[in-house]
């Protein structure tokens, strides 16, 4: 009986730790998966445009995207996509085929160029509306407390009625 009790407690603790660990992970999709999911349940799409060699991209992935408040927002309000700006994959997006036709070591993918409107800076985040149309691209590294108001500004459609500066004045961070 004693062994059974210890086994039960160990299993319970393992389950609790495993479940709580999953809550702090962003569910990342490919761009194609996000588009398909958006047909069934519309959400905005958050696209983290990164490269493998970008140090700030890696830092944002390791710190900002693991913060519980950011994870919660991305998983509940968006379809989150990580997009390697230098991928060699062919991507069908909005009825158009995008490729990486560059020959150089660090040539950008056509979709990255389109999403970032030719302003190639990493990391950058492209925000798409529920109809998969580009709202804007925001360049640069952001900490969790700096990213949270931007995420909510778009998630709540505040951009339709108020400037970001005005929105941010009344915003209460949950990351602090």
Image (tube, rainbow, N blue to C red):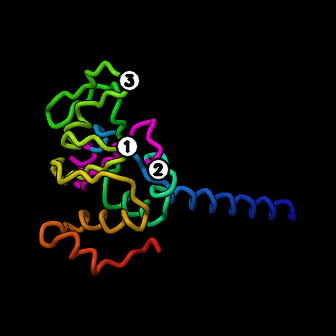
Q: Residue at x 38, y 23 (%)?
A: 105
Comparing 165 with 131, the one in front is: 165
Dot placed on the residue nearer the N-terminal end, 1 or 3: 1
Q: Position of residue 107 (x, y in %)?
A: 31, 27
User: In the image, is residue 156 above or below residue 113?
Assistant: below
Residue that badge 3 annotates: 105
Marks 2 and 1: in contact by CB < 8 Å?
A: yes
Q: Residue at x 24, y 63 (%)?
A: 154
In the rendered image, which quarter contains the N terminus? Answer: bottom right
Q: Position of residue 121 (x, y in %)?
A: 31, 44
Residue 41 can be seen in this image = no
Q: CA distance from mark 1 to mark 2?
A: 10 Å
Q: CA distance from mark 1 to mark 3?
A: 20 Å
Q: Position of residue 132 (x, y in %)?
A: 18, 47
Q: Which numbered disc, 1 or 3, marks the residue closer to the eye?
A: 3
Dot 2 falls on a residue whose secondary structure is helix
Dot placed on the residue nearer the N-terminal end, 2 or 3: 2
Residue that badge 1 annotates: 82
Residue that badge 2 annotates: 61
């Amino acid at each position: 009986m004693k062994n059974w009790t210890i086994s039960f407690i160990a299993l319970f603790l393992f389950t609790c730790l495993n479940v709580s660990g999953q809550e702090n992970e962003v569910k990342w999709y490919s761009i194609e998966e996000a588009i398909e999911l958006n047909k069934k349940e519309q959400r905005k799409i958050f696209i983290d445009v990164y490269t493998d060699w970008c140090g700030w991209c890696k830092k944002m992935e390791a710190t900002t995207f693991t913060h519980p408040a950011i994870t919660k927002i991305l998983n509940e309000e968006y379809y989150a996509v990580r997009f390697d700006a230098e991928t060699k994959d062919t991507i069908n997006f909005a009825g158009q085929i995008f490729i990486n036709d560059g020959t150089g070591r660090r040539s950008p993918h056509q979709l990255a160029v389109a999403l970032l409107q030719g302003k190639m800076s990493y990391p950058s985040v492209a925000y798409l509306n529920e109809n998969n149309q580009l709202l804007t691209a925001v360049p640069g590294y952001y900490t969790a407390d700096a990213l949270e108001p931007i995420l909510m500004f778009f998630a709540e459609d505040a951009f339709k009625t108020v400037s970001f500066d005005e929105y941010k004045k009344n915003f209460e961070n949950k990351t602090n």
